[in-house]
Amino acid sequence: DAGVIQSPRHEVTEMGQEVTLRCKPISGHNSLFWYRQTMMRGLELLIYFNNNVPIDDSGMPEDRFSAKMPNASFSTLKIQPSEPRDSAVYFCASSFWTSGDNEQFFGPGTRLTVL
Amino acid sequence: RKEVEQDPGPFNVPEGATVAFNCTYSNSASQSFFWYRQDCRKEPKLLMSVYSSGNEDGRFTAQLNRASQYISLLIRDSKLSDSATYLCVVKRSTASKLTFGTGTRLQVTL
């Protein structure tokens, strides 16, 4: 079975450019999470969706970041305009949410470098 | 203060050694606890959940101390393949959101 799929795996762009990261969650999962990981700050939750609805976007750094989930099988994280401090690894994860504890499965990540 | 704190390490141990990591959390309302493992340049993966009574999975033992708000992970008979970063993870409620520590790096050597 395919796990969480992210694209692109690597992205190098110049400051000011728009960046779009893509995620396909595991089929049947109803929760999707976007994380950012840096050496300094570790793994930070940016936003998460339940049943395609954004539940908590308090981790989104600022208005330059936006995320959408138009359907159960696709989500995007957009940065516009990008800045060098956005350089990080961005992970997407999915889970089947119920009231109990459910494992989050992570995609391989997108390594973003903003020059 | 960070919600989840870990010693970043690295912990350098010889093969066969026993090593323990601790993690503290600040929010007493936290309900669920986990250890995730992350290999270099890979994604995090669930290692084990942590239950109030403590639990074991092969060479790995996890314990929770709610009164002191800390979680521990003990690895016995370390293998080279155990070299990774171990992330302490806390969940506050039945909501989906997880809070990750910055991780403790383990390097097992010959």
Image (cartoon, rainbow, N blue to C red):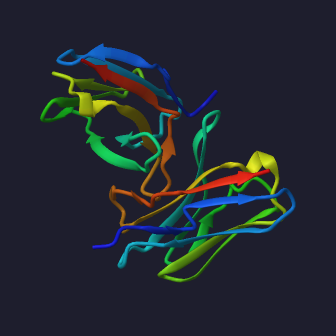
Q: In which quarter of the image is residue B19?
A: top left
Q: In this view, does B97 lie to the left or right of B52?
A: right
Q: Is residue A83 left or right of residue A42?
A: right
**Is there any visible trace of residue B35 in the rendered image?**
yes
Rendered view: A4 above or below B108: below
Question: From the image, which quarter does the C terminus of chain B lie in?
Answer: top left
Question: From the image, which quarter does the N terminus of chain B lie in?
Answer: top right
Rendered view: A76 above or below B53: below
Residue B100: give x, y in percent of width and height: 50, 41
- Which residue is depicted at the point 61% across and 35% down? A39
Residue A108: give x, y in percent of width and height: 46, 58
Q: Is residue B82 left or right of residue A12?
A: left
Residue most extreme to the bottom: A71
- How many numbered marks appear? 0
Nearest the viewer among A63 and B94 is A63
- Which residue is depicted at the point 39% across and 58% down? A104
Residue A82: give x, y in percent of width and height: 80, 59
Residue B48: give x, y in percent of width and height: 27, 42
**Is there any visible trace of residue B69 in the rendered image?**
no
- Which residue is depicted at the point 15% across and 30% down? B59
Residue most extreme to the left: B58
- Which residue is depicted at the point 17% across and 18% down? B16
Rendered view: B65 above or below A21: above
